[in-house]
Amino acid sequence: MANKDSCLAYLDITKSIVSLSRNQILGSYHRCKHLKFDPCYIDTDSLMVPEWPWNHCDTMNEWLNLPKVELKYEQRMKRLLVLYKKRYIYETEKGQIVTKGFQKRINPTVEFMPDVILKAVWQAIFLPDEAEQTVSLTSQGWIVLVDTLLQVMYMCRDPKKNSIYRKTKNLENYKSKSCTAMRILTKYPDKANDYVDYTYSRSDGAASEATKCVLDVEECEWVNYEQLFMSQKKIYCILLNTAFWKLPDPIKWFDLILNALHWKSFVHAELKYYYKTRKRFVLLVAQKVRYTFKINDHFKRKRGTLVLDNEETVKKVKNF
């Protein structure tokens, strides 16, 4: 509703404003039903009504009869796609696609991914005749996902271009002791109440949990691209599932794709590091699974052995 420095941050004032707007919306909803209109979506402060005949709300305001408060006509939408509560997408009359309720982080990756995925989803749902006919609808969804993730992975080879720009608070104002901002301020206490550039980096040698923490952009050589869009993963998954897959549990399959790409980039980075330094090292990754990568260097033959150390067993994978 408002930031902490605003007078609206006081609970009583906030309650009054929200309650008043909800009463208006509720009254407007019942009036629309009485006039034989069927509202398709209701938010805290808005009402969406298909085929509303006027570009104003005069008749509704007259019926509400609230002298100091009135409804305002905002705009017309060509199409509306509601994902779930407070998460929806619409197309304006000028053809612009607008997202509402998507968490945005200021970096090119999070701006790039929704644009590509939304374009494919929009075409599959509303313009199916223009979609690719030689590939099944399900396959199209997986192609869109993998192609987008691969592009993002290569974009993140330059961490300075994909850093996150965010303002911090004082340490005592954070409830979570393990959040990103806390890690940054623990390392750089002078950055409190300041805008900082940071990103999620790969571990590059040390085998400890500390290597997984968020690093300063200048210290990064390789961005952990998954962390940049994890907050939006559910929305991407719902979008693609709605348009293409129709699966009961799409997140599970989404994660399988991510794991495969993560493993591919992991092996590539470790091989590159070995050929450059001739050093072997251990890398800690998510879920506290320890990957040990060893390379046996022969005259004209190089063999790669992976040891997966977890609760189950020790596994070996094929040679590289």
Image (tube, rainbow, N blue to C red):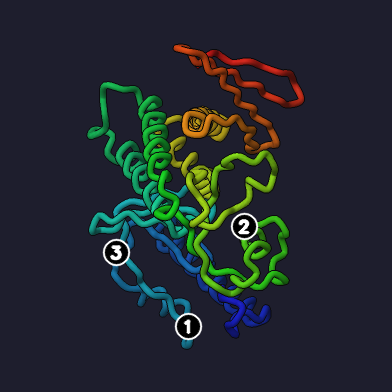
The quadrant of the rendering that contains the N terminus is: bottom right
Q: Which mark is residue 53?
A: 3
> In the visual, does 292 lie left or right of 242?
right
Query: Which residue is more in the foreground, 29 or 202?
Result: 202
Q: Badge 1 is on which residue? A: 69
- Cα separation between marks 3 and 1: 22 Å
Q: Residue at x 41, y 29 (%)?
A: 142
Element type at mark 3: loop
Which numbered mark, 2 or 1, is in the foreground of this view? 2
Kind of residue indicated by mark 1: Val
Element type at mark 1: loop
Disc nearer the start of the sequence (2/1): 1
From what the image shows, is residue 12 above or below residue 227? below
- Cα separation between marks 2 and 1: 42 Å
* Residue neighbourhood size for the residue with mark 2, other residues' Cα within 10 Å, grouped as few (<14), some (14–19), many (≥20): some
How many numbered circles does the render carry? 3
Query: Which residue is more in the foreground, 256 or 131?
Result: 256
Q: Badge 2 is on which residue? A: 180
Disc nearer the start of the sequence (3/2): 3
> In the visual, does 194 lie left or right of 79?
right
* Residue neighbourhood size for the residue with mark 1, other residues' Cα within 10 Å, grouped as few (<14), some (14–19), many (≥20): few
- Cα separation between marks 3 and 2: 49 Å
Q: Which mark is residue 265?
A: none
Q: Is residue 190 visible?
A: yes
